[in-house]
């Protein structure tokens, strides 16, 4: 090789060994996996399964909590119960909701995990029980 060759000429003449090719490919594959799992958002099947299970549990708790709030505010003594709920310490509110039966739905053997907490938080954030909404048939009839 002469010293006065251009970079492109030297590149064209370069012939890497099979060992260099092999380790370059292995290194590129490992680097791709590291970047993919850390910054690329890739997950394993086990992690994806756990994420789906957690998401389903949270969705169920949110649904049950919304139904709980609806049952709570449509009860005849809702204003008194809301006052009692607000007087109850924050760590005992979920027990108040569970004991009141608002978080229990027909067909459910046990309460949805986290639903009573969510329901209690939503109710505690209310200033007062909202007025019942009249349906279109009741307002025109």
Image (spheres, rainbow, N blue to C red):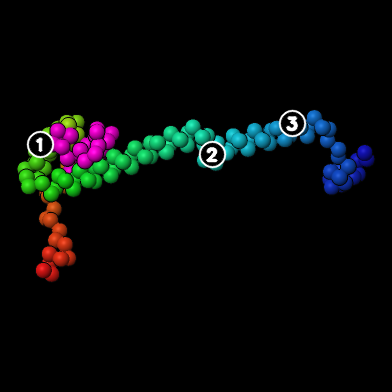
> Is 121 covered by the magenta stretch?
yes
Instruction: Name the image quarter holding residue 117.
Output: top left
Q: Position of residue 66 (x, y in %)?
A: 24, 46
* Disc 1: which residue: 87
SS at mark 1?
A: helix
Check disc 1: other Cα within 10 Å, few if <14, some if 14-19, many if 20+. Answer: few
Asked which quadrant contains residue 118, the reply is: top left
Name the residue tied to disc 3.
23
What separation in Å lies between label 1 and label 3 (alpha carbons)?
68 Å
The answer to whether marks 1 and 3 mark residues whose Cβ atoms lie closer than 8 Å is no
Q: Position of residue 130 (x, y in %)?
A: 13, 53
Q: Which mark is residue 42?
A: 2
Quadrant location of residue 89? top left
Q: Is residue 17 left or right of residue 58?
A: right
Front-most of residues 114 and 108? 108
Q: Nearer the viewer, mark 2 or mark 3?
A: 2
Q: Which of the pair 86/114 is nearer the observer? A: 114
Residue 47 magenta-drawn? no
Q: How far apart are the two marked residues, 1 and 2, measured between alpha carbons?
A: 47 Å
Quadrant holding the C terminus? bottom left
Q: Is residue 47 visible?
A: yes
Q: Is residue 17 above or below residue 62?
A: above
Q: Which residues are magenta?
A: 98-123
Q: Residue at x 28, y 44 (%)?
A: 63
- The mark that comes first in sequence, 1 or 2, is 2
């Amino acid at each position: 090789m002469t010293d006065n060759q251009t970079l492109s000429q030297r590149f064209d003449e370069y012939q890497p060994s099979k060992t260099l090719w092999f380790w370059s490919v292995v290194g590129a594959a490992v680097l791709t996996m590291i970047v993919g799992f850390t910054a690329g958002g890739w997950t394993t099947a086990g992690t994806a399964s756990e994420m789906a299970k957690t998401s389903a549990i949270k969705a169920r708790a949110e649904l049950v909590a919304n139904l709980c709030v609806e049952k709570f505010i449509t009860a005849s003594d809702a204003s008194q119960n809301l006052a009692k709920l607000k007087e109850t310490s924050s760590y005992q509110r979920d027990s108040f909701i569970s004991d009141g039966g608002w978080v229990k739905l027909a067909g459910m053997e046990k309460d949805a995990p986290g639903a009573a907490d969510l329901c209690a938080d939503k109710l505690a954030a209310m200033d007062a029980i909202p007025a019942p909404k009249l349906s279109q048939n009741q307002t025109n009839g």
